[in-house]
Amino acid sequence: MAQTTTITLTGAGGQIGYAALFRIAAGDMLGPDRLIALRLLEIPQGMRGAEGAAMELLDCAFPLLESVEISDDPNVAFDGANIALLIGSRPRTAGMERGDLLAANGAIFGPQGRAIGEHAADDVRVAVVGNPANTNALIAQQHAAGVPAERFSALTRLDHNRAVGLLAAEAGASVRAVDGITIWGNHSATQYPDLSHATIDGRPALETVDAAWARGPYIERVAKRGAEIIEVRGGSSVASAANAAIEHVRDWVLGTGDRRTSAAVVSRGEYGVPEGLISSFPVRSDGDGWRVVEGLGVDDFSRQRIDASVAELVAERDAVRELGLIP
Ligand code: NAD
Ligand code: LMR
């Protein structure tokens, strides 16, 4: 008998939730051998959207899908969760200051973290998508008593995939040929997509593309791709974000092999990033957990870019601390 994995997805009535749920239920995230129990968390205003998605999931008759439950209570929705995908968050609206946004999200991710600590399965792994993702993940992690810090992560896989796609397009290469890209820091415009150790078909990427492009327009384009999508589509990225979330969890649980990717994980001080921050690093997974790839050379340019993004994370952490959202 195949084992059943309980997956709690928040914001299930929203756009990314809708784009992710059907692929998860089809087995794209955990493979063809695991049965899936879905628990959908929404706020009252989002319940009808989640109910509609649940009806369509039933109508797909996915063989792997054991059950779908919907709740607006985190204590119910996280009960027994092996995997938690925290997608729902409070978006920034007109006139909202950054402090207001952090406070509004603190009111979501604090209680969700607490509920995860109290009700989730012993092996729970948490991936935060809702923005500001790194700091929301930090807030949740700090409230999840008893859950090891390394079980919390935030998504920079979308940035990573964007960086791979845009490099491959520039080089006229297949995305399959690209390896060794790293996204460092925050999932924000300060992030640093780093090609220093990237390869295309085994050759250094910086021998194929112009180094001035790689350290100028390329960084800008990747780091501001979210805004570019909003401008062109008239709404923020949805399918690519859902895809990235699925790939992030798939690699975390099933392993990456030798391939490197990027994920925001709790720093243990690697590469000079202050301990405890949830910052993006070069990572691999052996299936048991993310492992930061250590020992990569960091030149002066990279050092400055990493430090700038990490400084933003420190400022966000200090702001939520001042607001009393984390100890
Ligand atoms: P959306 O507005 O379509 O959906 C969000 C859903 O979350 C809504 O249905 C809302 O009711 C729900 N929600 C709000 N508060 C909740 C709570 N406390 N508990 C449960 N559900 C709650 O937005 P979307 O397009 O699905 O995007 C979701 C989030 O993902 C946003 O914060 C967005 O900025 C972020 N995002 C992150 C990345 C990334 O790479 N990290 C990429 C794209 C979007
Ligand atoms: C993205 O990267 O597409 C999202 O985080 C949305 C945004 O505001 O950039």
Image (cartoon, grey):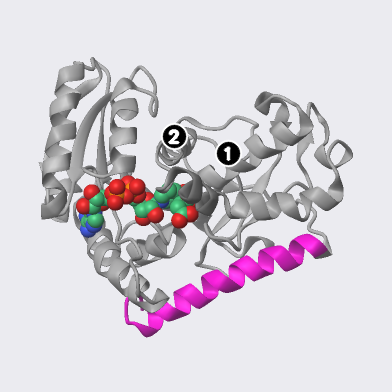
Q: Is residue 162 above or below residue 27?
A: below
Q: Position of residue 271 (x, y in %)?
A: 68, 61
Q: Nearer the viewer, residue 241 or 149?
A: 241
Question: In this orientation, does residue 239 appear?
Answer: yes
Q: Nearer the viewer, residue 50 or 306?
A: 50
- Circle 2: residue type: Asn
Left or right, residue 290 beside residue 94: right
Q: Position of residue 266 (x, y in %)?
A: 50, 59
Give the quarter of the image for residue 31. top left
Question: In this orientation, does residue 128 appear?
Answer: no
The region drawn magenta spans 301-327
| Residue that lies at the very extreme toward the bottom in this rendered image | 322
Q: Is residue 43 above or below residue 145?
A: above
Q: Position of residue 108 (x, y in %)?
A: 25, 63
Mark 2 close to ligand 1, CB under 8 Å: no
Name the element at disc 2.
Answer: helix
State which quarter of the image contains the N terminus.
top left
Disc 1 crowd rating (10 Å Cα; few below 14, some 14-19, many 20+) is many
Residue underneath mark 2: 243
Q: Nearer the viewer, residue 172 or 194?
A: 172
Q: Is residue 149 above or below residue 77?
A: below
Please give the label number shown on residue 161: 1
| Residue that lies at the very extreme toward the right in this rendered image | 207
Residue drawn at (44%, 32%) of the image? 250
Q: CA distance from mark 2 to mark 1?
A: 10 Å
Left or right, residue 321 beside residue 110: right
Residue drawn at (33%, 56%) of the image? 147
Residue drawn at (52%, 57%) of the image? 187
Give the quarter of the image for residue 104. bottom left
- Circle 1: residue type: Asn
